[in-house]
């Protein structure tokens, strides 16, 4: 177990450098004026130019200069120093204010996913090919096929503006109620995937040989399903949910943008719109790290849940 | 059609006159979108306390399905038990409620399966799995169950049992896993143990160890055992009687020695001749020509007729009854007498 | 597991096909029977599936829209008059006009071209990368597989939307061709991993088959074995994955355009129109609802088509 975690940790360190290097290279490698690239089409003031040159060590040239700059960038990233946005605000401060909102939203989405997705998935898996199963299957296909950029504005329009069941936008300091509709929209995709995954997993495990063994031991059906089958079926589901939590935090760009929720995704959304390069780079870097860490947590979780992996 | 018209006379009647386990004229079908497969067509066999019955046949002959019908663990659908009785200690199991049948499973009749790796739950420690019935059915405390589990693991000769309680199935070798499986089946001290190809997935040397273990346990615990196998070699040292199945019927039923000496059904004869023998040098191994029948279209008359070297017109037209040949042996062949006499020399 | 269980299980899967032309026998029982091809089975399955026909019809309809928008609308999507802002339906403008005074319906029809172009070309490019990488990794195994599998892991570990944002931020050109090319490139570079994994595993399965060993013994070279014997096996699952991917590429293009970093203004794109319609939804909802519906139906059609085909080829997954 310990060796497994250690190995995964090492792999994550490698993945961290690999991914950040790719992200960094994509942002800065081989272009005419890196500062103009960061700023997009906006005019860059002399003060900004000087700040960015110093910040990213753009006066260093060549491959050596590139790695020098890269390690400097990683060092700053690890120290939590993300520099300033083009508007002059500290990116770390922006993120510090945004995280609680984003986490709250992600947790609502996750709750929706677990309560509805996993439960319905278990039921559909047990009664495979029944009416409930077939209708949820079709419904989830619909949800999976509707992009967030369609779902979010339409939900906002119909449920928020037209029928006024929910507040259409969240605003500066959103309460739980204001986050409910965005949370459901954000969670709907994970819900559909979780439902299908749970269903397949339960249905597969119900056919497994060990279920026949459990029956031949004379256990009651409730125990066979709720202990033997569920414990096995939930391994891939829990893994998926872990990865998904990372996704939900970074995937809230559209939802937070549409519903005006001042979270991390919203700031990224605004950074893209206002062509604020440093802000976009800073947030993307942090989100990539969040993504990597959540993947690591999931792997460890997997090992805890599945003994076959643990002792590999 | 009924093969039970002449039922085999019991080899050793129980004091009460009935058998411990008595399968009578069982018919099972698998109903699917593709059609109906008639998997069990009038199987009758019985088991007395303390004896071992081997059920022999190739895959698809219905031997495992019969066992699963006895256990009540057939998947329904597609399986449907059309008719017949399964009497255990005089009670017809098929007439019981699901809850009553559950009480019988594991406690009265237990079963072990072919592939212990997939038959054991991969995510629970073996100690937990062996002790599950003790805790949840026998109502033992954790500590008592633990003690009993160690006893059971010692009984099936798993070394360092106390240390291996918390290990998971994949950490055991194939033979050890099968021992875990056996310990689990013995937990509730069943009177009948059904072993469904218990050694098929194992190495030859380990096979012998497991068979010896099963034979010893059967004797020491005074259980009755049904040993399902497709391997004639496995049967010889362990079983008292053999029932040979083909296309969902029992085609020959005999005392082990009598059957080896002179099989009275062409199918059994074919099976025996296809085993390599130590005492004949340079022989060419015989095989049974053709393939097992499609259970959706079982041949008319005797289902074995398309593959039978003794085939006559009567075999195509008439379903053979069980012919009683004395010593409690039967053969479902129109020419049972000839086949046996043929085999005798 | 006894062989009967296998029979039961496999029959269980095929049960919903209903009586097929011939009363087929379960293979396990081994009776002589006509071999049934997987493709034939799959086609029989598909023919009965209404979802397959509905989604196929939608795909054909959208493809027609992309190829010949003139068949569906006579109005020019760029003929915009502010005086017609949010005006009601008139003169062929089925759904009225948007904030800029452009024909909402005409814009939605003309939006199909960019979407399908991006979707189809990225799927094609993705398919080529996936087939190449998956084939090399699966066929050669050992260190080739180890290296390529790590690369797949790393690329799979990069969140698609974030990486696309970073990459597309670097494209400053406003030329429609450059932007479309950039979006296609970005989606293909980030999106090939799932396909590669599927191809890799089907190549590994195919490699073990007897006929491949036979071909090798007859002296066929690696290239010939890969192209003639293994590729056909890897193709069907790859196409299914790519059909579904095509749907998600269309959604991704719309999302990037919605964010303002995908396609840009003179190009007509559903993503751009949804964003514009969203801003003015309180005044008029049709400019939001119409392109949203077009986009959702198109994405759905491809995903459902892929889903139906996959179910037909691999009933186990149902």
Image: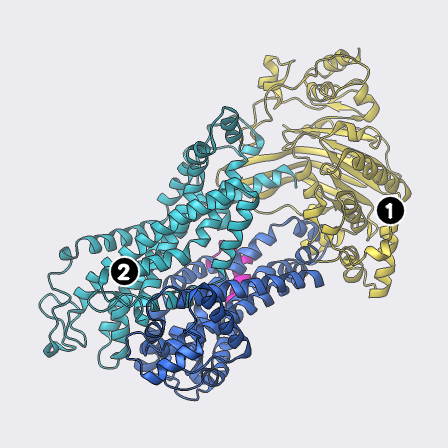
Chain colours: A blue, B yellow, C cyan
Q: Are marks 2 and 1 in contact (CB under 8 Å)?
A: no
- Same chain, labels 2 and 1: no
| Label 1: chain letter | B
Q: Residues within 10 Å of mark 1 (few under 14, many from 20)?
A: some
Q: Main secondary structure of the magenta part?
A: helix
Q: Which residue is mark 2?
A: C180
Asked whether residue B96 is in view, the answer is: no
Asked whether residue B125 is in view, the answer is: yes
Rendered image: mark on residue B157? 1
The local secondary structure at tag 2 comes to helix
| A78 or C168: nearer the viewer | A78
| A208 or B70: nearer the viewer | A208
Front disc: 2 or 1: 2
Q: Is residue B213 magenta?
A: no
Q: Is residue A118 magenta?
A: yes
**Which stretch did the figure color magenta?**
A116-131
Task: Give the quadrant of residue B3.
Answer: top right
Q: CA distance from mark 2 to mark 1?
A: 70 Å
């Amino acid at each position: 177990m310990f060796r497994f975690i250690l190995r995964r940790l090492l792999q994550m360190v490698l993945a961290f450098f690999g991914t950040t290097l790719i992200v960094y290279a994509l942002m800065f490698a081989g272009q005419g004026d890196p500062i103009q690239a960061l700023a997009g089409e906006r005019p860059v003031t002399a003060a900004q130019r000087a700040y960015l040159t110093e910040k990213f060590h753009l006066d260093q040239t060549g491959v050596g200069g590139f790695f020098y700059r890269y390690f400097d960038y990683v060092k700053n990233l690890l120290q939590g120093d993300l520099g300033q946005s083009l508007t002059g605000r500290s990116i770390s401060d922006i993120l510090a204010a945004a995280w609680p909102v984003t986490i709250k939203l992600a947790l609502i989405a996750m709750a929706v996913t677990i309560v509805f997705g996993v439960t319905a998935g278990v039921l559909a898996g047990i009664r495979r090919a029944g009416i409930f199963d077939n209708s949820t299957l079709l419904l989830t296909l619909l949800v999976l096929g509707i992009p967030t950029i369609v779902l979010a504005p339409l939900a906002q329009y119909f449920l928020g503006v037209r029928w006024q069941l929910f507040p259409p936008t969240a605003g500066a300091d959103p309460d739980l109620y204001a986050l409910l509709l965005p949370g459901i929209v954000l969670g709907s995709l994970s819900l559909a995937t979780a439902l299908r995954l749970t269903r397949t997993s339960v249905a597969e495990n119900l056919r497994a040989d060990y279920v026949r063994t459990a029956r031949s031991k004379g256990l009651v059906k409730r125990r066979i399903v709720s202990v033997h089958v569920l414990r096995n079926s939930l391994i891939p589901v829990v893994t998926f949910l872990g990865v998904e939590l990372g996704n939900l935090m970074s995937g809230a760009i559209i939802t937070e943008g549409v519903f005006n929720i001042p979270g991390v995704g919203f700031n990224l959304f605004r950074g893209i719109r206002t062509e604020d390069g440093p802000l976009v780079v800073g947030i993307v870097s942090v989100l990539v790290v969040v993504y990597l860490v959540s993947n690591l947590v999931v792997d460890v979780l997997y090992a805890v849940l599945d003994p076959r992996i643990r002792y590999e | 059609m009924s093969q039970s018209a002449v039922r085999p006379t019991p080899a050793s009647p129980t004091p009460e006159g009935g058998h411990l386990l008595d399968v009578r004229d069982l018919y099972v079908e698998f109903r699917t979108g593709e059609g109906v497969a008639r998997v069990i067509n009038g199987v009758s066999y019985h088991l007395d306390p303390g004896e071992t019955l081997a059920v022999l046949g190739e895959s698809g002959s219905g031997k495992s399905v019969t066992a699963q019908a006895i256990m009540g663990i057939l998947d329904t659908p597609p399986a449907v038990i059309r008719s017949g009785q399964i009497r255990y200690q005089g009670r017809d199991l098929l007439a019981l409620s699901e809850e009553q049948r559950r009480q019988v499973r594991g406690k009265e009749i237990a079963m072990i399966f072919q592939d212990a790796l997939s038959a054991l739950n991969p995510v629970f420690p073996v100690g937990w799995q062996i002790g599950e019935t003790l805790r949840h059915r026998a109502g033992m405390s954790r500590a008592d169950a633990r003690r009993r589990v160690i006893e059971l693991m010692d009984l099936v000769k798993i070394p360092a049992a106390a240390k291996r309680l918390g290990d998971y199935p994949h950490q055991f070798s194939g033979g050890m896993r099968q021992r875990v499986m056996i310990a689990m089946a013995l937990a509730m001290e069943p009177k009948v143990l059904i072993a469904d190809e218990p050694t098929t997935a194992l190495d030859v040397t380990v096979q012998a160890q497991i068979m010896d273990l099963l034979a010893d346990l059967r004797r020491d615990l005074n259980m009755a055992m049904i040993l399902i196998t497709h391997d004639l070699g496995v049967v010889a040292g362990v079983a008292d009687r053999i029932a040979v199945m083909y296309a969902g019927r029992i085609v020959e039923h005999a005392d082990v020695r009598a059957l080896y000496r002179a099989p009275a059904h062409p199918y059994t004869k074919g099976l025996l001749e296809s085993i390599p023998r130590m005492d004949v040098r340079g022989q060419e191994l015989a095989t049974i020509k053709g393939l097992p029948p499609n259970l959706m279209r079982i041949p008319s008359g005797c289902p074995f007729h398309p593959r039978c070297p003794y085939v006559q017109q009567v075999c195509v037209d008439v379903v053979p009854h069980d012919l009683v040949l004395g010593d409690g042996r039967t053969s479902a062949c129109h020419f049972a007498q000839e086949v046996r006499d043929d085999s005798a020399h | 597991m006894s062989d009967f269980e296998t029979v039961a299980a496999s029959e269980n899967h095929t049960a919903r096909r209903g009586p097929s032309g011939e009363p087929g026998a379960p293979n396990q029982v081994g009776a002589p029977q006509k071999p049934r091809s997987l493709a034939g089975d799959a086609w029989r399955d598909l023919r009965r599936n209404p979802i397959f026909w509905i989604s196929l019809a939608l795909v054909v309809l959208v493809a027609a829209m992309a190829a010949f928008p003139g068949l569906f609308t006579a109005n020019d999507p760029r003929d915009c008059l502010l005086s017609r802002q949010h005006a009601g339906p008139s003169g062929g403008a089925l759904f009225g006009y948007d904030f800029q005074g452009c024909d909402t319906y005409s814009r939605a029809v003309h939006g199909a071209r960019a979407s399908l172009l991006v979707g189809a070309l990225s799927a094609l490019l993705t398919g080529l990368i996936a087939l190449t990488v998956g084939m090399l990794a699966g066929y050669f195994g050992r260190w080739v597989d180890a290296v390529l599998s790590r690369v797949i892991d790393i690329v799979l570990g990069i969140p698609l939307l974030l990486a696309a944002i970073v990459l597309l931020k670097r494209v400053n050109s406003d030329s429609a061709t450059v932007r479309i090319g950039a979006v296609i490139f970005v989606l293909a570079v980030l999106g090939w991993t799932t396909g590669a994994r599927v191809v890799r595993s089907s190549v590994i399965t195919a490699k073990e088959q007897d006929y491949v060993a036979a071909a090798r013994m007859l002296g066929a070279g690696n290239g010939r074995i890969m192209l003639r014997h293994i590729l056909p096996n890897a193709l069907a699952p790859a196409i299914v994955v790519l059909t579904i991917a095509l749907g998600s590429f269309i959604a991704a293009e719309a999302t990037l355009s919605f964010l303002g970093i995908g396609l840009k203004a003179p190009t007509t794109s559903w993503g751009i129109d949804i964003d514009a319609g969203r801003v003015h939804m309180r005044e008029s909802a049709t400019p939001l609802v119409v392109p949203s519906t077009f986009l959702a139906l198109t994405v759905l059609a491809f995903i459902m088509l892929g889903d139906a085909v996959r179910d037909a080829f691999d009933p186990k997954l149902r």
